[in-house]
Amino acid sequence: MANMTHELIEFINQSPTPFHAVESCAKILEQNGFVPLGEQEEWSLQAGKGYYVTRNQSSIIAFRMPRGKVHNFLITASHTDSPMFKLKGEAISPAFDRYQRLNTENYGGSIYSSWLDRPLSLAGRVVLAQNDKITSHLINFDRDLLIIPNVAIHLNRNVNTGYSYNPAVDLQPLFSQGKDASVKKLIAQELNCREEEIAGYDLFVYNHMSGTVLGVNNEFFSAPRIDNLMCVYGTLQGLVSEESAHAVNVFFAADNEETGSATKQGAGSIFLSDVLDRICEAVQSDRRRLLASSFMISADNAHAKHPNHPELSDPQNAPHMNGGVVIKTNAAQKYATDGISAAVFGEICRHANVPTQPFANRSDMAGGSTLGSISNTKVPLMTVDIGMAQLAMHSAYETAGVKDVAYLVNAMRAFYACNLTVEKDGCYRLSCAKRKVEESSDV
Ligand code: ZN
């Protein structure tokens, strides 16, 4: 189990931006025999084989064709992005005195204070124009490069009594004391190219601290981007380790959840729909019939009851870290879960010996949302919203439970191996293989 957590921390370290998260997924997929496809290419899909396709280099869909006749899709969806700071086109703020700062804007709903006084770095993609070619290159400086310093308490007496950080003033990272410091020069050195060849970039400031395991019994781990790389990792581990007899197993990790999913590659786009269409064409099946028998797990982390603020949780529907997979419900359907999808997923977990726990917001609090219901407007199918209980969501350094990594992986393996059929609307038959419980039985 500790191994799985260390593997997850390594996955997170290798994935500072959505582009790198997609690259990390592609590496694992290729190690497991999955073949890359391009959206611009013709596809010829073979039974029993695995494939993956990316869009914008920041969203990825992988799928494995069954050996038998296709009956349905078993889909997981998670997101590759986390709150960060994005570099603007003119990347250096006006210099004053001896300071050069980067000119950034906030991406997603960050907890601002968590980004101060810790080593930060830069990563993303750089676009080079060379002769008649325009090519995108991933870049990760992967060193302690930047810092956003707090103002000393002697100069800001309000800092402990509710100070409001202004992103345009308080959150610009310190970059250099050199007058000629330049982001393009730094990129050119790293990519071994000429500055004039740099035609564009999407670069993000990220927390450069590694994850770590902590607690008296090593029961917790803390890391950047646990929301939602924990779910990306867990669902991917499920996909690569299982084959289904009659379902196309699909893994979707989408960019831009933190800003509402409404992009060409986000969960609000038709990326998933396009890929499912092409699979339906390949197996000459009616998409509507397949979708009616299909199931999606929308996996995005949940709020654990907070040790210092238990009053912020619903008294009965408050999950704990290390308590198993959280099933999230919301009356307004910000979560796509309903009684039937909760029951189907609950049964899959029960067969896999994975505990589940319910989450709902306090009735006087709005709470968050995620990609399940958004994706359902483009690809409607029975969907459950789940996640693992964590603290400090959207902090630069979040905390979750070590046992939960194994619970998630085991639940996803069981999902991708289950056999679900629809007898009529409201009546389903589920069979789950008897499974050896890996790593979660001793926790
Ligand atoms: Zn999330």
Image (spheres, rainbow, N blue to C red):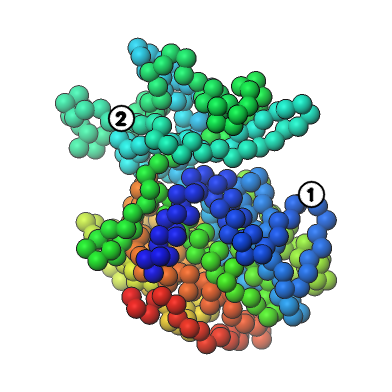
On residue 40, which mark appears? 1
Q: Residue at x 45, y 49 (%)?
A: 13
Q: Residue at x 40, y 22 (%)?
A: 176
Left or right of 376 in this view: 119: left
- Please state which amino acid type lies under the numbered disc 2: Pro
Number of residue marks: 2
- Please state which amino acid type lies under the numbered disc 1: Gln
Q: Is residue 197 above or below residue 12?
A: above
Left or right of 143 in this view: 90: right
* Residue 111 percent location from the top left of the image: 36, 43
* Residue 182 percent location from the top left of the image: 50, 20
Q: Is residue 165 visible?
A: yes
* Residue 324 percent location from the top left of the image: 39, 72
Judge by depth and name the residue closer to the eye, 56 or 333.
Answer: 56
Secondary structure at badge 1 equals: loop
* Residue 362 percent location from the top left of the image: 34, 62
Report crowding for label 2: few under 14, some 14 to 19, many 20 or more residues within 10 A (C-alpha): some
The quadrant where residue 318 appears:
bottom left
On residue 165, which mark appears? none
Left or right of 151 in this view: 332: right
| 2 or 1: tag closer to the N-terminus | 1
Judge by depth and name the residue closer to the eye, 198 or 367.
Answer: 198
On residue 149, which mark appears? 2
Q: Residue at x 72, y 69 (%)?
A: 49
Q: From the Cβ of disc 2, is ligand 1 less than 8 Å away?
A: no
Q: Is residue 50 above or below residue 16?
A: below
Report crowding for label 1: few under 14, some 14 to 19, many 20 or more residues within 10 A (C-alpha): few
Q: Is residue 379 visible?
A: no
Q: From the Cβ of disc 1, is ligand 1 less than 8 Å away?
A: no
Q: CA distance from mark 2 to mark 1?
A: 46 Å
